[in-house]
Amino acid sequence: MIPQNFIRHKVRPDDTLTSLARRINISENDLKEFHNQNCGKMNKLWVTNLRGIEVVLIPTRFITEEEYLVQQHKMLPPNLTLPIFI
């Protein structure tokens, strides 16, 4: 994942990692990974239940690593081929 910007979402009683991820159209794993990479040492997310969690960091301009690589590939000149190392 390539972290961009994020907002601090105050967790509501009915929020779960699943419901938040669906709302912003990313996977649970990507949301959990994004939050854990940006939250510091405390308040890591380990499960989908957010009981006891006050804030979840939500990306505002999120792209997956695969999307990032596709964007980079599109920026290469069309006749350029990358070497394949075996």
Image: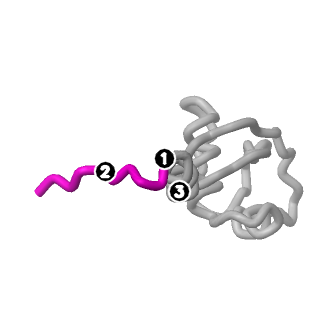
N-term-proximal mark, 1 vs 3: 3
Sequence-first tag of 1 and 2? 1
Residue named by callout 3: 70
Residue shown at 68% from the left, 37% from the top: 4
Q: Which residues are magenta?
A: 77-86
Q: Between marks 1 and 2, how big is the CA–CA gap?
A: 10 Å
Q: Is residue 84 magenta?
A: yes
Amino acid type at mark 1: Leu
In the picture of the structure, the residue carrying the numbered disc 2 is 82
Find out whether the residues at labels 1 and 2 contact each other: C-beta distance under 8 Å. yes
Q: Residue at x 69, y 49 (%)?
A: 62
Quarter of the figure that contains the C terminus: bottom left
Q: Label 1's element?
A: loop
Q: Quadrant of residue 41?
A: top right
Whether residue 58 is visible to the viewer of this picture, yes or no, is yes
Q: Is residue 18 left or right of residue 38?
A: right
Residue 64: x and y in percent read 58, 55
Q: Is the magenta region chiefly helix, strand or loop? A: loop
Nearer to the camera, 39 or 52 = 39
Seen as rendered, the residue at the extreme front is 79
Residue extending furthest toward the top: 40
Badge 1 crowding class, 10 Å Cα cut-off, few under 14, some 14 to 19, many 20 or more, is: few
| Residue 19 in the image, given as x and y percentages of width and height | 78, 68
Q: Earlier in the sequence, mark 2 or mark 3?
A: 3
User: Tag 3's secondary structure?
Assistant: helix
Residue 81 image position (x, y, % from top left):
33, 53
Residue 6: image tag: none
Question: From mark 2 to mark 3, how far is it between C-alphas?
Answer: 14 Å
Q: Quadrant of residue 35?
A: top right
Q: How many marks?
A: 3
Q: How is the image coloured?
A: one colour
Left or right of 18, for residue 44? left
